[in-house]
Image: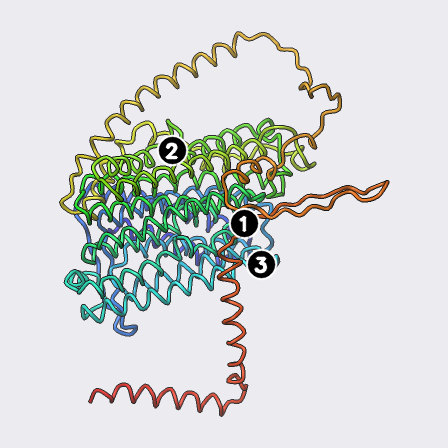
Amino acid sequence: MDILFVSLALLVGGGFLSLALGWSSKLSRLAGMWSGVAGGVVGLWACIDLVRAGASQTFAIPWPTAGITIALHVDTLALFFLAPIFLLTLACAVYATSYLHATTRGGQYAYHWFFFNLLAASMALVVIAANGLFFLVAWEIMALSSFFLVTYDYANEEVRRAGWLYLIATHCGTVFLFMFFLLCAGQCGSFDFVAFTALKTLPQTMTMLLFGLALIGFGTKAGLFPLHVWLPDAHPAAPSHVSALMSGVMIKTGIYGIMRMLTWLAPLPAWGGAVIFTLGIIGALFGIAMAAGQTDIKRSLAFSSVENIGIIFLGIGVSLFASAIGQPAIAVLAMTGAMLHIWNHALFKGLLFLGAGSLIHATTTRELSLMGGLLRRMPITGSLVIAGSLAICALPPLNGFVSEWFIYLGLLKMGQVSSGSIALLAMLLVVFLALVGGLVLITFSRLVGIALLGEPRCPEAASAHEAHWTMLTPMAVLMACCLLFGLYPALVLRTVSRVVDLLLPGSHLAAAVGQGEPLSSMGRLATLLLVCITTLVMLRWQRAAKVRRMPTWGCGFPLVNTRMAYTAGGYAELAQRSLLCVCLQPKVAIAPPVGLFPQASRLTMAAHDLMFSRFFQPLFRHVADRAITCRGLQAGLLHIYILYIFIATALLLGLVLLPL
């Protein structure tokens, strides 16, 4: 616990030091970067030390002035979420040193590093907080620091719009969390999480009310469909390493909140789990359908995060559903897959956002259709992006395959042991999850093919160069972790089984651990194959004679150019028209050639978020129109404001004296 405090002190202290050194860009950058790196390293050391210690640890000190108890508790569940937080913080801090060098102006280093380190520290505090009020304070610090990082390029109107949308969404979710913790404290007589064990004795109506409040509050931060509307705008607006941190671990704090809530409440009925896996599978389908239609590389990755969050909630929901109907083995398999996917998504999505940042850094554009030919110019970055794409497509031998393997096993087993409507439901979920996998393959083969292969489609792509080693090293580390967890899942399966035991006490953990043995054997075989293939490739490369290079055959066309290549929209058009309903297909606008001597024709495709444009945006406008009527209360006169204070004080006194 002391080592963990040192990590938090390094992060917070380094952030303030960077702010104090704002007069010097170099000193501010060095202070912020090295404190972020040191905080991540020490934090990982603390996680390893706490895992070895085994027992949970608690720290508490009252803060009488604020009425808050600073209570911290580290157990298996907290450690499970702490490890990726510190790993991504370390990777993103190293990556940012070169990434920010070309885009940062003046004193922005201090501004960036202060909020970056504060975001990392606040995420860790959210995970280890053991008091409701202190949790909400840390949650608010996390929300505000991430808002200022999203609006880093505040001169851009699109960035400001995305930042405000994120701030509104996150605070709407916080309102539900306030109600959740107030109700919990009212039922238990304390805001300390230790007292929340009394929630298990509540009637089912109150239990489901608390479950609903927590699902909305935490689900908004997690990007759970349909509460995801802030995520596709906020992630592209932020710097790429901040996008990696937010998508990799910040949205997982919402999942942590739901997991922690499940340890307090009585077991949910079967329909509670059904609600979760329904939202999960719809979110997975919606997210990847929208990702396949985006031409902005970071926006496509952001919608992909909605898809992966949906897969995680699918596993959680199936687990709760199976537990409620008396199928503990299925519950363990599904929960194991969901927990593994939390780590796996942090690794490969962090890798992909950092890789996208390197491509954007080299080409100065986020448009896929303006890239091309980057694998030849950036071979290391391109290879790492390809590895991340294989991992997110759940292809062996990388880690994405392992977590989805367990979710598939849980669904297939539920279909085998059940009958009637439950068996049909399980098979439908298998089909939908397979459809998600197919769309993922289309989305990321498009990303790799359009951005990395072919010929450059803009001058900046033609002159692109390999990223700096400080940008390549974090990506290589994340890729190595993806490969390691894919080849040897037993390294993490024991840790995950302890988390599952906490969430599903008394379940048959041997079911999940036993299913990991074939994967470990496959990992050893894959390692041997990789070594053999690498050896053969190296020997062939050494003996190969010089090969005469000729232009690619253009089907009888002598003047091959980039206009003959697929664009990002054209590549996925056939799949979109055949697999997606009309409401999810991109909107196409065509300006056809006109006249005897026509000008250039134009075709544009845009995939807009249906939930935001048809539900949330009209709702926000309606609320804003009604709120305008209240502007008259802001009279700007001092005596009017004093009257407001007097009325509020009188009402509060009345509420206090009313019970007497």
The part of the image, by quadrant, that contains residue 603 is: top right
Where in the figure is residue 334, as x and y percent of width and height? 27, 41
Residue at (24%, 88%) from the top-left corner? 658
Left or right of 370 on screen, residue 192? left
The part of the image, by quadrant, that contains residue 484 is: top left
The C terminus: image quadrant: bottom left
Contact? badges 2 and 1 (CB < 8 Å):
no
Contact? badges 3 and 1 (CB < 8 Å):
no
* Residue 361 vs residue 203, the one in the foreground: 203
Q: Amino acid at mark 3?
A: Tyr
Label 3 vs label 2: CA separation? 34 Å
Residue at (44%, 91%) from the top-left corner? 643
Where in the figure is residue 19, as x and y percent of width and height? 48, 58
Mark 3 or 2, closer to the camera: 2
Label 2 vs label 1: CA separation? 34 Å
Q: Amino acid at mark 1?
A: Lys
Left or right of 321 on screen, residue 395? right
* Residue 56 vs residue 633, the one in the foreground: 633
Label 3 vs label 1: CA separation? 22 Å
Helix, strand or loop at label 3? It is loop
Q: Which mark is residue 570?
A: none
- Relative to 7, does residue 137 appear above or below in the rendering? below
Question: Sequence order check: which comes first, mark 3 or mark 1?
Answer: 1
Q: Amino acid at mark 2?
A: Cys
Q: Which mark is residue 26?
A: 1
- The residue under label 3 is 154
Q: Is residue 93 visible?
A: no
Q: Is residue 144 visible?
A: yes
Question: Sequence order check: which comes first, mark 2 or mark 1?
Answer: 1
Other-residue count near label 1 (Cα within 10 Å), few / some / many at <14 / 14–19 / ≥20:
some
